Image (cartoon, helix red, strand yellow):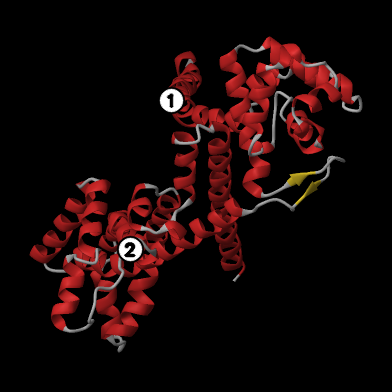
Amino acid sequence: MSAATRKPGGGRLVALILLTVPLAVYAFLYLMPIGSVLSLSLDNGALGESLSHIRAADPADRDAQAAALIADMQAMEPGRQAEVARELNQEMSGFRTLFLKTARASDGIEPTLAGLVVADPRWGEEKYWQVIRQNAAPITWRHYQRATGLVVDDDGRITAGGDDIYLQIMGRTLVIAVQVTLVTLLISYPLAYAVANAPRRLAAFVLVAVLLSFWTSILVRTTAWVILLQTAGLVNTFLIWTGLVDEPVQLIFNRFGAIVAMTHVLLPFAIIPMMNVMRTIPKSQVDASRSLGAGPVESFLRVYFPQTLRGVGVGGGTVFILALGFYITPALTGGPKDQMLSFYIADFVKRALNWGMASALSVLLLAMVLALVALFGLVRWLSARQGGRA
């Protein structure tokens, strides 16, 4: 009896231990990188430490600010001066030259605002001091302000007077993802239907073709579309040979080329979920519908198709989420106005070396995905609730 009473507690302990391991792996592989990206988007520790005297100076006392800036410059090593100048230049063009010029001559500059103006008249402009004050804190929102186009005025109020270019890019990314999802579903549904319901040999052929595409590198598939769709490629050659066009058509390096290549890459992610759901639908249901007088179209629309919507939802959702983060395919096949947000994230990492801005854009992209998932969940909950009431 005592052994029987101890068994449930021991089972809970074992279950808790078994649950702890995947949770720890999940936190290490998923939550920690997200936390790191979030901290990078807000972190201003290195720049704040380099401008510690400015942070402690009275903002209303211009001479005190000037003396603090000179003290900060003199305390920096040459390499650190260049790094601070580069980061400030990301906020305002021309700041790098101004900062380095003043830092090199700081030993001979009078520690007052007038002394700085003598060294360079630009120090008399308030906009440079505003940038320095905004970047003297250990935590900064400047990356999010730049990403969203929001501006903080002198009174600390947030206004929408900045450049909203990255919000436009986010909107473009969303539109392209929706377009690719719709095209992918239109193509993948009949292919999945063929795999699930066609004769065995035809189904096997279609499935092998899908899997071969799935196993091929994304870069290889994208490059193949570049070759096929270029002005001297196979598609244009065929169109001219058939007389459909008189001269080559621009099929690549535009929105059409990006959507075609992305659709081809993402087809397996839509076909496989729909195929798995279709295989679970008994064929006898359609036969029963036909025996009751329904035609083939009505049987498909009223009996078969509604049961496949679960697979359509899973496949479409997977394609949409993957399309939001695409980088290689639109970068190689799209034009300048077809680049998605991931292109600019990679550009900030590789070319501009602005990890904070890249992290801020990544966080905004993640927030958009989470908002869309939450909206989809809310719609499902409302529809289920209305169905339960009915």
Question: Front-most of 107 and 330?
Answer: 107
Residue 199, image x, y percentages: 11, 68
Q: Quadrant of the C terminus?
A: bottom right
Question: Front-most of 124 and 316?
Answer: 124
Front of the two marks 1 and 2: 2
Give the residue at x 26% y 70%: 190
Q: Which mark is residue 25?
A: 1
Task: Give the vertical position of 42 relative to 82 (above or below).
Answer: below
Give the residue at x 49% y 42%: 345
* Relative to 184, 382 lies left or right: right
Q: CA distance from mark 1 to mark 2?
A: 39 Å
Q: Which residue is mark 2?
A: 257
Task: Give the vertical position of 295 relative to 388 (above or below).
Answer: below
Mark 2 or mark 1, which is nearer the start of the sequence? 1
Secondary structure category for the residue under label 1: helix
* Residue 309 seen from this side: no
Give the residue at x 39% y 62%: 180
Give the residue at x 28% y 79%: 288
* Relative to 46, 52 lies left or right: right
Residue 76, image x, y percentages: 65, 13
Q: Amino acid at mark 2?
A: Gly
